[in-house]
Every structure is written in C-alpha cells, then in structure tokens.
Amino acid sequence: MSDELLRPGNLVLYKQQPARISGIQSKKISIQGQNGQQYSVRTKDVMLLHPGPIDSLNALADCSGDIESAWELLAGEKTTLEELADLIYNAYTPATAWATWELVHDGLLFSGTPEEISVHEEEAVEQIRTTRAHKAAEAEAWSAFLSRAAQNQYAPEDERYLYDVVALAQEQKEQSRVLRSLGRTETPENAHAFLLQLGYWSEFNNPYPDRFDVVTETSDLALPDLPEEERRDLTHLAAYAIDDAGNQDPDDAVSWDNGRLWVHIADVAALVAPDSPADLEARSRGTNLYLPEQTVPMLPPKSVHLLGLGLHEVSPALSFGIDTNEDAEILNVEIVPSWVRVTRLSYDEVERQIQNPEFEPLYELARRFEEYRLANGAVVINLPEVKVRVSRDDRGSGNVEVLSLPSLRSRDLVREAMLMTGAAVASYAQAHNIPIPYSTQPPPDEEHDYNTSDPYSLSAMFALRKSMRPSSQRSSPEPHSGLGMEHYVQATSPLRRYLDLVVHQQVRSHLRGEEPLSEKALLERVGAANAVIGGIRRSERLSIRHWVLVYLMQNPTWQGEGIIVEQRGARSTVLIPELALETSLFGLQDRGLDSVLQIELQSVDLPALEARFRIEK
C-alpha cells in the first residue's frame, strides 16, 4: 500500500480488526485499536478501508441494510468495498465500510479485497453453507465425544476419533489429538491406559506386535509340489519327532542306527529355492512369530503340510548321519535327502519311556555330548521357564494359563541332538568350503558378581545370565562359548528360522554339485534376517510379559514364592519361579540373596507392564 494513501483519521484493517491511524512517521505509522491501545506498525501491515476522517472507533455502530438484495443483484460479478457499501447501506461511511468488510471477511456471500470483491453465485453460496453446517455438526460431535471421553465413556459413533489413540498405543503415530485435547500426555503407555479405561480395548488387546511392526498375517504364497529326485530310503529306522504336546509344525526327528545318530530335518530347501518368492517372503519375516495367542509362520501353511515330519505315513527329510567316539566327539558326518517314517511323541510321553531300548541309547549319547560341552566351557543357566497359553472367545475375552516347564530328560535328549547336528553341519561345511552363517558367542563378562557361595543358586544363575554377551552370525567359524563348541550353526529348524533354511539351501546346492551362494550373498541374507528378528524377539518377550500380567489380573488374590536374586541398595530384584517373572521390592536389605519370600499380588499396571507385590501379611 502506498504511503501517500494513508492519512491520520483513516479507518484501516489491522490483524482483521478495525484501527484508526493516529500519526504518520518516516517509516512507520501509529494506529489506535479498539481497546484504545497505540501501535507502531509498518504500512504493509494495514489495509485501508475508508479515508475517514474517523475520530473514534466508537463510531463503528451497527448498520442496517439490504444485504440479500445486493447479493442477488451482483451475483457472479466483481465490485469494490465502496460500491458494495453504498449498494447495501446507501452510504459509504467508516461505519458502513466496516460493516461491509465484515461481510466480505465472513466469506459466505462475498470475498476478496477492498479494491476487488467477488460476489458469489448461488451454487457457491449453497456449497459454503453445506460445508459450514458439516463443520458445525462435526464440532458438536467432537465436543460431545470429548465430554463422554472425559467420563471414560464412548459411543459407537466415537470410534473414528479413537483411531489416532490406537495408532499411538501401537506406536504407529507419535501424537494423538484426542489425548492432547483431554490434557493427557501423548505416550504409547498413556494411550493404552486410556483405551482400557474407556473400555474400547480390553486386557486381551496385545499392542506389542504392532509396536514392533511385526507381520501377523499368514503368507498366502503358492508353493510347488515336492520335486522328483533320488532319496535314500530310511523308513526302516524308527524315527521320533519329540516336541510339546499340540505342536503343529514338527520339523525334526531322531533315530538310532547301531551307534549312529540320525537327525532328520524337514527338507524345506527342496521346495524353497534361493530368491524364489517363498524365499524372499521368508527372508522378510526372518522367523516364525510365537505369541501366546497365535503362531505366525514365516512360510505358507502348505510347507508344513508337505514337509512336516510325521504328518504323513512317509515324510521327505534332509537327514544327517553322525558318528561319534566314546567322548561324543564327532568323527564323521553324512548328509542325504531321504524318506523317513516318523512317530510323533510329546516330551512327557518320551520322559516316561526314557529307559526303554528305543530311547536309552539316544539319551546316553545326549548325556555324553552335554558332558563334552561342559568340559569345553559351556555355560549352563537354569532359571524357571513357563509356557503361556491364551484362549479367546467370540466376545474378545478369554482365559490365560501360565504353565511351568519342568526339567525333563526328554528335553535334554532333543536339545543335545540338535546341538550335535549344528556342530556336525559346521564341520561338514568347513570340510567342503560351503559358505554358511556360523553362530558365535564371546565368553561371558567376567565382572559379574555372584555374591553367593552356591554357583547353582537362582541368584548365581541370574547374575550369569546378565553377564552373557550376545551371539551373532559370521561367515567364518568362531567358538560359541555359551554352548562350549568350537564351531556351530543353527540348522535344525528351516520351517521356523530363515537362516536355518539358508544353511539347508547351501548344503543342498553342494550335494547337487551346484555352486552355493557366495559369502557376500550369504551375509546379505544374514543382515536382512537380523534386521527383523530383533523386533520379533522383543515383541515375543513383551507379549509374554503382557499375558502373564493378564493372568494376574484374572487372579487378583495370587500368592506365592519370590526369591531374592539381586540387591542394589534398598532395591531387591525378586524372581517369582511360578511365573518366571521379575519384580522389585524395597527395604529387604536385612535378607540375603536367595532368601525365599511369601508374597502376594498388590496391583497390576498393564500399560506399564508392571506388577507390584508385597510381603504376604
């Protein structure tokens, strides 16, 4: 705006409010607002509405005019503030100029600047009215929702507003308009707590898979049929797939053949070739997702139907024949595609038959191999373990069970057979220059503090676990100190773990006389799998804790034993064996490590993943 047009006494617009110019300086002008306050502003900060003179803004009284007729007469045309004011109010004064500008600023019938005002056509006016009515209704609905939400209530029509709270609870968003409007801190834990208080979520909503962007849908990729190829007939051997009762994806079995251990593994690489669609899908998932409420496989369900051991009378397998000496050291390894006849048994069933002829030599070899590993520095950590089961009904609720996992010789048998297979495959790969992802682990941190005379106590096991360093995959063999093995590779669960499948693909390429993947391609697969496995494992760990706390919510009078496993000043870490749960209690300095406490549940804060206990009264 030219300074020449501005004079003392002009009516101007400043920040959408009327003002009167009271003085002109060299670079700025002085104006007086409706509250009488003086401002020094730039000329570009104001807009001339009327030349005046106007002595006081009190002169801007309400005006009476024929707005509707003026609009109908000029609809679709352009005009100026002066012309429009004269048409509506039959005069162009500071008061009518301001009244006209308010109509322009309202935007329903008119819009523009004082020099050029557009007069809206009827269709545009109706559209604006419809939009405003919708906004008014939306504002009313939003206000009603906030009123209900403040009282921890919601109506069905409120669900659309809760999406951003759910997204924050699942860490898909960082902010929530709802929580902000209610004066609540915008954190995933607060969002979770609000959804529970509102009744929109129940304790049966587990947010952790979504928080870690874990895939919870089953793959629907097609798989080819099993190819025709030569397989060794091992159906004359008694083969046993031993797992938890109710297991749905049996992928390993063991046989005893006159001194030779055979470990049969589901032959996944026969169906899933490197870089095939199923391989790429499995690589993106990394591993099966095991949640108490569901299992999400990394491979399409058809893979279990075709390859699961013992699901049909005869099963295809990749079989590992392992010969050992009296000290359970591996002497020879043979790997062959095979046909096997598998009987499925639970750990409990085998435990009852462990001394029978079909299992006694297998268990004896497992015992000797464990002794071999212990002599080689293997770390044994015996801490309570539980299995959490969740059953849900159609109403979104259900029941949670927490079952202790007892130490069984049958579990030892299977564990040692699988570890021996990992050592055997590592040895075979070294001998034949096959690139594979070796599992390695450095020795424990020697600075951990047992503070106990019993190295097998729970406090000692707890301290030892904290001292363990993470394992990793490498392209060259290095010791796995935790297992007490010079070289080791995970190779016994290709249905469940992607890198096990990669090992099988590499071994199968060698057996067919083909060139296996290069070390570079191998490490790319290791990196891709590890990029997602960390989130999956954290999701599983926090999900288990979530469901254990739900179990406690369903059993609010819970009482049981707690054992002090660590003390740091006034704070004691207490392990609850029955739940495999850690909690903190204070003021127990007079009690030593491994003291047994009788405790009872005090409260559960599910969003914070905390349960509070107290000494039983």
Image: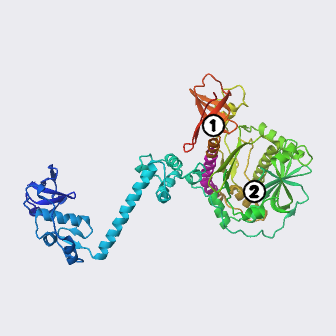
Tell me if residue 82 comes above or below residue 577 in the rendering.
below
| Secondary structure of the residue carrying numbered label 2 | loop
Percent coordinates x, y for residue 346 in the rendering: 81, 50
Residue 190: percent from left, percent from top = 49, 46
User: The magenta stretch spans which residues?
Assistant: 524-545
The amino acid at mark 2 is: Gln
Tell me the kind of residue under disc 1.
Glu
Q: Position of 616 compared to 317: left or right? A: left
Q: Name the residue tied to disc 2.
A: 248
Q: N-terminal of the two: label 1 or label 2?
A: 2
Q: Is residue 525 magenta?
A: yes
Q: Going 65% across and 31% down the picture, which residue do you hit?
A: 599
User: Can you give x and y, in whole percent of width and height, for residue 303 in the image?
Assistant: 73, 63
The image quarter containing residue 279 is bottom right
Cα distance in 3D space between marks 1 and 2: 30 Å
Indicate how the structure is coloured in the image.
rainbow
Foreground pick, 564 / 424:
564
Left or right: 274, with 178 as reference point: right
**Identity of the residue drawn at 73% across and 65% down:** 302
Looking at the image, do the residues carrying marks 1 and 2 touch, with CB atoms under 8 Å apart?
no
Residue 170 image position (x, y, % from top left): 53, 52
Q: Which residue is mark 1?
A: 582
Report which quarter residue 13 is drawn in. bottom left
Instruction: Look at the picture and state if 534 lies above or below 520.
Output: above
